[in-house]
Image (spheres, rainbow, N blue to C red):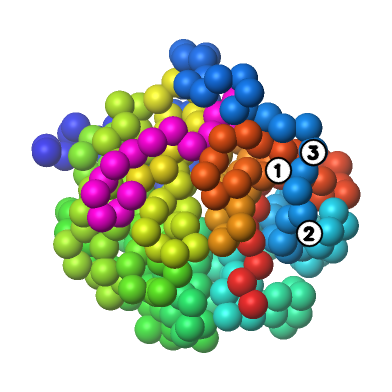
């Protein structure tokens, strides 16, 4: 592929993020849901395990913890905090409190919030490995959003080798449940698609081939499958089996469904994703019908993620 083929090459970090959102938003009007109405939304929510999320309930997006329908605010600053993820009893998130998107780490209760990155470019979308020793994140410190790793202390920040040219944008990295692999999004095949590679870096394998692109992968609890967002038509969820590449529809609605997170019992996602009016929904690990999940807070929700203690 030549450099000029990628629709996101040459964009600034903020333009890259907006571009991905625009890709999904523009698709919302082009197709109806691929699932039948009785597969789409159920009236009653099942019991939901604790999760963290970002919400603008207080005006500026901040990080919250949801427990049994009651939310506790974890961050308190006048700038945006978003993209929370947890593992091994720790929480990582992105904060704009330093007038630049940087990665922070804290206890699960939001205690001891510590800045880990100090680059002039975007640092975002961090995830902790299951052992709690390493963090993978996206950084545009060299001009293009690429995958980096670091220790949980912030030491040893290093670009990951992913098998593509360094001008190809990457985003949304997530560790597999056993920590051996990283799934992420790359535009190396022109449109954004989901790829997987060894956690230490190396040659990546393309898993999705969506005609409208694919973003926001989330691992199944056993590490055999990935739920992701297909931007073919109205953004909706699909699932790909790692070993075979078999891809099936997972969940959809008449509005965009995105930003999934799964545990052994269920998956969460955002209904109305990418449009500033998001709310949390849940579904079984087999997908299908969705149920609303109350956070006990007003405001738009993004990036729900199950708490990993």
Horizontal side of residue 115 vs 46, given as left or right: left
Query: Can you tell which mark lies on residue 66?
Result: 2
Tell me residue 237's x, y (percent). 49, 37
Q: Nearer the viewer, residue 115 or 238?
A: 238
Q: Residue furthest left?
A: 2
Q: Nearer the viewer, mark 1 or mark 3?
A: 3
Q: Nearer the viewer, residue 67 or 25?
A: 67
Q: Can I make out residue 18 in this image?
A: no
CB of mark 3 within 8 Å of CB of mark 2? no
Q: Can I make out residue 155 in this image?
A: yes
Quadrant containing the N terminus is top left
Magenta residues (range) = 241-257
Which residue is under mark 3? 44
Distance in Å between CA atoms under marks 1 and 2: 11 Å
SS for callout 1: strand
Among numbered discs 3 and 2, the one appearing first in the sequence: 3
Distance in Å between CA atoms under marks 1 and 3: 13 Å
Horizontal side of residue 78 vs 95, given as left or right: right
Residue 253 among those drawn in magenta: yes
Residue occupying image coordinates x 55% and y 20%: 36
Query: Can you tell which mark lies on residue 151?
Result: none
CB of mark 1 within 8 Å of CB of mark 2? yes
Horizontal side of residue 261 vs 241, given as left or right: right
SS for callout 3: loop
Which residue is under mark 1? 280
Tell me residue 144's x, y (percent). 33, 52
Among numbered discs 1 and 2, the one appearing first in the sequence: 2
Residue occupying image coordinates x 69% and y 41%: 281
Tell me residue 257's x, y (percent). 57, 34
């Amino acid at each position: 592929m030549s450099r000029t083929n990628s629709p996101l090459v040459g964009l600034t970090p903020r333009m890259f993020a907006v571009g991905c959102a625009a890709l999904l938003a523009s698709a919302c009007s082009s197709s109806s849901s691929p699932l039948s109405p009785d597969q789409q939304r159920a009236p009653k929510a099942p019991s939901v395990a604790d999760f963290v999320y970002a919400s603008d309930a207080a005006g500026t997006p901040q990080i919250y913890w949801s427990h049994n329908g009651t939310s506790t605010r974890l961050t308190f600053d006048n700038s945006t905090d978003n993209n929370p993820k947890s593992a091994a009893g720790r929480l990582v998130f992105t904060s704009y409190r330093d007038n630049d998107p940087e990665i922070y780490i804290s206890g699960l209760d939001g205690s001891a919030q510590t800045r880990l990155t100090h680059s002039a470019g975007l640092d975002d979308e961090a995830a902790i490995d299951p052992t709690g020793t390493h963090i993978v994140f996206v950084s545009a410190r060299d001009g293009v959003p690429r995958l980096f790793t670091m220790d949980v202390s912030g030491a040893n920040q290093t670009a990951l080798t992913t098998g593509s040219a360094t001008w190809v944008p990457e985003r949304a990295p997530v560790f597999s449940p056993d920590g051996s692999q990283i799934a992420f999004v790359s535009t190396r095949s022109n449109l954004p698609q989901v790829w997987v590679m060894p956690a230490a870096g190396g040659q990546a394998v393309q898993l999705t081939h969506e005609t409208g692109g694919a973003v926001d992968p989330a691992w199944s609890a056993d590490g055999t499958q990935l739920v992701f967002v297909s931007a073919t038509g109205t953004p909706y969820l699909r699932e790909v089996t790692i070993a075979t590449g078999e891809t099936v529809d997972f969940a959809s609605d008449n509005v965009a469904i995105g930003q999934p997170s799964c545990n052994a019992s269920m998956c969460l996602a955002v209904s109305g994703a990418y449009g500033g009016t998001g709310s949390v929904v849940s579904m079984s690990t087999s997908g299908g019908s969705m149920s609303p999940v109350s956070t006990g807070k007003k405001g738009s929700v993004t990036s729900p993620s199950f708490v990993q203690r």
